[in-house]
Structures are given as C-alpha cells and as structure tokens.
Amino acid sequence: MTDIEAPRAGHSPDDVGSRQARRQQALEAIFGGKFRHSFLSPYMVIEDHVIECPVAIRFYKKDFNYLSKQLYLEYQYRSWNGFNPELLDKYATITTTKLAAIDTLMQNNINRLLKLLEQHGHLGSLTLWPGVLRTDVPIIAAQARAYIGVLSKMDRLYTLSGTANLLGVIDSSQRADVEFTAKKAVRAFRSILQTEVTRLYREAQRIIAEQHKTGKVDAAMASVLQQQSQDIAEFAASTQHEGEELTLDLMRGEPGQLIAEAAAASVAAAAAGGTAAKNGRSTKTKAQAALGEAAEAVASAGVADLAAPAAAL
C-alpha cells in the first residue's frame, strides 16, 4: 500500500500551481511570450525584488532583458558542433570577472559610506525614495543574477550617498563623484558585453554559413542566430539616443580598464581611509580622501565611449 503524503502547510496543489503561474508570468513579462514557450532550460525567479534608485531602475528596465539573453547564449552555443570553445570560455571569464570587479567597487564604496555615517552617529536607513520598483525577476543565466546583485548594490550606494549628503557628512561634489563612478562602471560592462557578443555572433554566422555550403542547415540553430541578430539590432537602436550623454559621461578609453582600475582604486581608498584613521586625521578629511581618490583615479585613467560594436553588423 502506498502512503499518500498530506500537503504541507503553504504547499497545497493550488499554491504550487499559483506560484508556477507567477514564475511563468515573470518570464513572459521580461522576455515575451515567444521566449517563454520556446525556452527549454531551468530558470529561477527572485520574487518581490525591490529597486529604489531611479538610475538602477533605468538600467534594469533598459538592459536586463537583452543582457540576460546574451549571457544565456554562452551555454546555448556550447551545444553547437564546431563552435570555438575558447571563445566561449573567454566570454564566460570576461563577463564573470568584470561583474565581480564592479561588485567590489560598489561594496567598497558602500562600506566607506556606512563607516562615515557611523563615525558621525548616523544610521544608513534614514532616507526614502519617492517611488520604488517591486517586481519578480526571472534569472536564466548565472551572470544575469550577478548583474542583478550589482544593481542592488548600486541601489544601496545611491541611497547611502544621498543620505550622507543630506546629513552633511559628504558634500554634493563627493556625492556626485561616487555615483558617477558607479554609473560609468555599469555602462562599461554593457560595452564589454557588446564587444564579446559581437564575437560570438560572428562565430555563429560562420557555422551557419558552413552549413549552407553543405546544404544541411539546422533550422533550430539558424533560428537562434536570426533571433540574436534581431536582438542586437533592436538593442543598438534603443541605445543610439544615449550617444551624446555617453560621450559627455565617459569620454574615450577602454571599458575593461575602467572597471579594473575603479575597483582597485576603491580598495586603495579603503586602505587609505583606514590608515588615515590610525594617524588621527579628521573625519571630514577622511571622507574627502576616501570618496575622492577612486573617482580621481578613474578620471585620470579615461573610460569608454559605449557606442555598441554590434551596431556595425
């Protein structure tokens, strides 16, 4: 005789069905109905995810759909016979390490701001944003989850910089510098991804071209390439209007260098802040040093013009 287990509290069949429907709705809301019905891989959903900072909300709404699809392609292309594995390994390494570096940059600046607020006897949770985005976030690639983590830390950083400024712990110039550095780093990742996506796309083109020569074209593979081409074109078109703003914000340089040097500068600034504390420097001076050094290092290094390379395809 088979024992039938009673449904656990909160896990009735109706609850399970409702949650599954919610997750499918989240997938469709971000990627569309066609993607939802054709996607054949496990995914997860971060339910009730909150983003408060308008800049982070804008990055999420504008970039997350596209970045997620392109990050997932690294796995998808590994099933293609003849696809250069070294290209895919490089793609995975670059996206993973750059996101980790941006995460380090954000966290170091968060830690310094929290320390400054603490030294002045203030909490970091004293301010509110006029509006927030609460949404279910579908995750289809590991790096896409890391990107959401970066946006969450950006959200926290902007909140703390605004709080510290309102309380007089840092001035408006210091607030603008720390926020500007964070925004440039996230934009630089977009540029790096676009460059690497272009390489994957051209490799996929090569494989489909070889199939055409033999007269045996895999329809599913050709469809993936066609969809990527469409996604690249649409994303490039959606970012064209940002050209002037990006030129003013980022000037010219190498985006990978920006991220690496900004993260390194944040570590150095944190160490300098600790040394300054031991030497008895004033709290205001420490604030200026800690928040100013990273921004100065990034500015002197130069950063990227993020015109999407894929626009030339």
Image: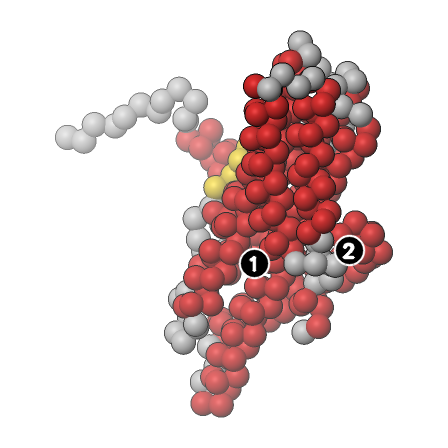
Question: Which residue is at a point 60% across and 55% down the rendered structure image?
Answer: 256
Locate residue 194 relative to residue 94 in the image: left or right.
right
The quadrant in which the N terminus is found is top left
**Badge 1, how many Cα within 10 Å: few under 14, some, many 20+?**
many
Observer able to see residue 120: yes
Q: Residue at x 52, y 83 (%)?
A: 209
Name the residue beneath numbered marker 1.
70
Q: CA distance from mark 2 to mark 1?
A: 26 Å
SS class of the residue under badge 1?
A: helix
- Amino acid bearing label 2: Met
Report which quarter residue 180 is drawn in. top right
* Quarter occupied by the C terminus: bottom right
User: Residue 123: percent from the left, percent from the top?
Assistant: 65, 13
In the picture of the structure, the residue carrying the numbered disc 2 is 251
Mark in the foreground, 2 or 1: 2
- Compare residues 23 and 131 and report the one nearer the observer: 131
Give above or below for 220 relative to 234: below
Q: Nearer the viewer, residue 214 or 164?
A: 164
Does residue 57 appear anywhere in the picture? no
Marks 2 and 1, the one that precedes in the sequence = 1
> Is residue 300 rendered to the left or right of residue 76?
right
Q: Which colour scheme appears in the figure?
A: secondary structure
At x 42%, y 31%, the residue is 13
Mark 2 is surrounded, within 10 Å at the Cα level, by few (under 14), some (14 to 19) or many (20 or more) other residues, namely some
From the top left corner, tell me how far across and down residue 185 is, in percent. 66, 46
- Residue 41 numbered mark, or none: none
Residue most extreme to the left: 1
Q: Nearer the viewer, residue 187 or 101?
A: 101
